[in-house]
Image (spheres, helix red, strand yellow):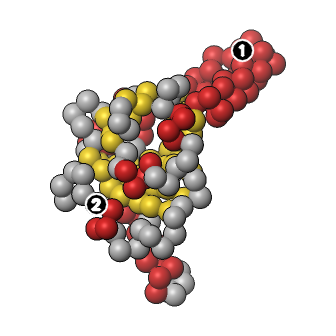
Amino acid sequence: MARGRPPSWNPFGTMIEGAWTEAVAVSSKERVTLPAAVRARLSWFGKATDEGLLATLDPQGRSELSAWTTSGSRAVGDVAQRLEAAAPDDRDDLAIAAMDRYMRLAVEPPARLALPFGLAVHLDAVEGGVVRIVVSSSRLWLWSERQWQARRMDRIDLLTGSAN
């Protein structure tokens, strides 16, 4: 489908205001543009564009994005406290774990996210060229499209009433 299409392509998009999902292309410069339908569901997103976003990576091939001013500052403070309290021999490993878990994203107008290369790799976007955007209850997630598709039957089972 062409860029800039109206959200009416999704006949279920108006049923629940706080939920949306869409696969989007990743540019050659590891940039992703959030569709207008996504931005409309995130009241906090407009205020977050100046400071950027915090990406919190999890092992399931996804990352939650949140406003840097609140979540990023908190994560940095928490890690700083843990580093200060850690034994000297553990500090390097703790710092590397934080670098592996948290990343800061820049937001360029109108809503283009510059993905750090490590995040693009985590989301399989370097090879696949696509990420899945998911909004649920005012939370924003980027998923590996490969991981999203691997769980597709579980979501379809919710519709059909099948149990695994």
- The image quarter containing residue 67 is top right
Q: SS of the residue at dot 2? A: loop
Q: Is residue 115 visible?
A: no
Q: List the residue tagged with mark 1.
A: 89
Q: Is residue 48 above or below residue 93?
A: below
Among numbered discs 2 and 1, the one appearing first in the sequence: 2
How many residues crowd mark 1 within 10 Å: few (<14), some (14–19), many (20+)? Answer: few
Q: Is residue 54 above or below residue 161?
A: above
View extreme (left): residue? 2
The disc placed on residue 103 is none
| Residue 91 position in % (x across, y down) | 69, 17
- The answer for how far apart the CA atoms under marks 2 and 1 are is 54 Å
Tell me which residue sits at (63%, 16%) in the image: 92
Q: List the residue tagged with mark 2.
A: 6
Callout 2, which amino acid? Pro
Q: Quadrant of the N terminus?
A: bottom left
Callout 1, which amino acid? Asp
Q: Is residue 138 above or below residue 92?
A: below
Q: Is residue 164 visible?
A: yes
| Residue 16 position in % (x across, y down) | 51, 69
Tell me which residue sits at (42%, 31%) in the image: 107
Front label number (2 vs 1): 2
Q: Is residue 154 left or right of residue 132?
A: right
